[in-house]
């Protein structure tokens, strides 16, 4: 086993210099770092990272927590895109990523607890926010560095988060449909346990109210079974009395599934029904019809959540903050004026 | 700090039983495990996972190595899908995932070395295979458990890998285009450093040769700049003398980009040029036109690579194997008979 001393001797520096090179200290010049690293590689010396991180209490790893199983999440292009933003900043700051794989709330909580208690990661990004969020509460109480993609339901002022103005943008897309002459507008959202569903529903209702359109409860479809499955969503819609002429959907993935399913009922988009999505997936530009959507800045959500997390890891004194990423309506061909 | 002894006393079991529960020993009943875990949670006792994994030399973590930066890889839906397969098996076997974030060959190699030397992971999955693959060679020589998604260029018999029959399926898609009357068929692949490019080019040439169509070098476009960018690929194609009437492309993502770009030149798919892809992305069913593609079983590639890796981690005596995942031509509307 090669030792630090041997590396130091071979590189003609003090052993403390080798330690500082390993710790990537700014006090050592890039030239010296290169030379020492070259010697380390040549002699086959590698610091045992686990032992080192036990001592240094640093892992240079970020835990990324998915809302459900990673397996399920990866079916939705939102997650690769938010991970792309996370990866970009993590790479720049020389952090690795540790992904959760749990599929139930209990499994995910256990993973987070073991990341924290086992010091497997330096900080955690939660990729969702729920109403009763035991995991977020646990992280907050333990004082472990974390950031949230989404708005915390409680304790907003003591948690750093990155979110869109979900009330505002859903109001905007609903107003856009109203401006096309639609009055019977449905809202197909996710589970009402997610804060994003609550915020979007609020924006949808505000737009209706301000235009004097009465809110019809039958037009609001928010549950897991429907949100994850275009076929179920279309079935639920077709059962509504006084069928809607336009739909605001949870996300583009669901919108595309619904359009495919509506075709099989011979209902055409946008001629028979207008559909708008969220997230502006890259496929939405090339789909048939091209999908009207909201660009929520998914990459930026991930990038900035990582930036503020690392800020917090490296400086525990930094104040919590809430950052709003701008969102933008992208008009394409899936919404049309009512005839 | 709560100790094992306190947990044992509270749960009314021997301290050794608590240790076995922590190690998830099959010798302890599920009922006892539940009881002890409940006490652990109540008292706030958590084994320090890093310290424990140092002792046990196990991290219950799998390193996943992307071909380029994760940031870039996540732009291609192939990677989320292969990660979905990896996550599914990792979750079932109770392993976490550690993702590489390096963007150059040197950075990626350094990450792998630090995963191995630092014992950060129990095993590694390489999501690509190159001709001169220093990282694969390093893993092979170090005896560290790893599997490859793709065919190793050398030492095939001593490495466990999961791949498609890339020669056979590319031959099949080329024969399909020939059967539609095409003779001027282009091959737009990735960098010739990747083994998958070599195999696919071989299948393409075999199909041409068996049909008596001479191979024209100008119809083979294999380089990174073109492969990652539909606009560049189209530009390169349009510069070819005696313009091709059909194209076999690296993957669906590139095919979609090319179709979008060809439209801007007023060249219609499939009327003016036929295009076939690989990977059968979910968007390829809904695109305009729906894309003819090869379903390569991406999820299974990830799932089985993980399965054989964990097999190897848990039983170092297991023999290396090469597993071929079946691939299937999916005929849609982007290829048409030549007029």
Image: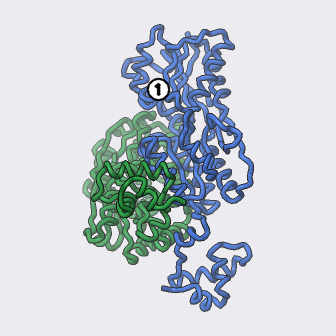
Chain colours: A green, B blue
Label 1 chain ID:
B
Q: Which residue is mark 1?
A: B223
Image location of residue B298, percent across then percent down: 60, 42
Give the left or right position of residue B149, taking residue A233 as reference: right
Query: Picture quarter containing residue B30?
Result: bottom right
Q: Nearer the viewer, residue A316 or A164?
A: A316
B138 versus B286 height, above or below: below
Where disc 1 sits, the SS reads loop
Q: Image point 43% across, 75% down: which residue?
A: A138
Q: Image point 45% across, 66% down: which residue?
A: A52
Quarter containing the C terminus of chain B: top right
Q: Nearer the viewer, residue A293 or A108?
A: A108
Image location of residue A114, percent across then percent down: 51, 71
Give the left or right position of residue B137, taking residue A143 as reference: right
Q: Is residue A184 visible?
A: no
Q: Image point 45% across, 8% down: which residue?
A: B241
Query: Picture quarter containing residue A168?
Result: bottom left
Image location of residue A37, percent across then percent down: 41, 51
Mark 1 nearby-residue class (10 Å; few <14, some 14–19, many ≥20): some
Query: Picture quarter containing residue B208?
Result: top right
Image location of residue B262, percent across then percent down: 41, 21
Q: How many marks?
A: 1
B9 versus A332 height, above or below: below
B296 versus B109 height, above or below: above
B175 versus B127 height, above or below: above
Q: Nearer the viewer, residue A97 or B328?
A: A97
Q: Is residue A274 visible?
A: yes
Q: Image point 69% across, 80% down: which residue?
A: B31
């Amino acid at each position: 086993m090669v030792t630090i001393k041997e590396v130091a001797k071979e590189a003609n520096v003090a052993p403390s210099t080798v330690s500082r090179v390993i710790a990537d200290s700014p006090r050592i010049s890039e030239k010296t770092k290169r030379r020492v690293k070259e010697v380390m590689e040549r002699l086959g010396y590698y610091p045992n990272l686990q032992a080192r991180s036990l001592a240094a209490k640093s892992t240079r790893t970020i835990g990324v927590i998915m809302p459900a199983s990673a397996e399920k999440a990866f079916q939705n292009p939102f997650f690769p895109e938010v991970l792309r933003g996370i990866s970009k900043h993590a790479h720049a700051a020389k952090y690795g990523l540790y992904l959760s794989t749990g599929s139930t709330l209990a499994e995910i909580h256990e993973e987070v607890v073991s990341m924290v208690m086992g010091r497997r990661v330096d900080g955690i990004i939660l990729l969702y926010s729920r109403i009763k969020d035991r995991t977020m509460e646990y992280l907050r109480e333990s004082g472990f560095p974390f950031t949230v993609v989404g708005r915390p339901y409680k304790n907003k002022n003591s948690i750093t988060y990155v979110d869109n103005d979900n009330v505002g943008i859903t109001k905007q897309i609903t107003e856009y449909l109203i401006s096309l002459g639609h009055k019977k507008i449905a809202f197909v959202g996710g589970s009402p346990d997610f804060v994003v569903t609550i915020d979007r529903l609020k924006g949808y209702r505000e737009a209706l109210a301000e235009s004097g359109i009465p809110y019809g409860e039958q037009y609001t479809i928010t549950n897991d079974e429907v949100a994850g499955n275009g076929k179920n969503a279309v079935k639920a819609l077709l059962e509504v009395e006084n069928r809607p002429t336009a739909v605001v959907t949870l996300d583009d993935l669901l919108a595309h599934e619904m359009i495919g399913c509506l075709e099989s009922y011979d209902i055409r988009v946008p001629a028979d029904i207008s559909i708008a999505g969220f997230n502006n997936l890259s496929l939405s530009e090339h789909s048939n019809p091209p999908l009207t959507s909201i660009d929520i800045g998914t990459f930026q959500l991930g990038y900035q959540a990582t930036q503020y997390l690392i800020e917090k890891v490296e400086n525990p004194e930094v104040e919590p903050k809430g950052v709003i990423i701008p969102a933008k309506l992208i008009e394409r061909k899936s919404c049309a004026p009512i005839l």
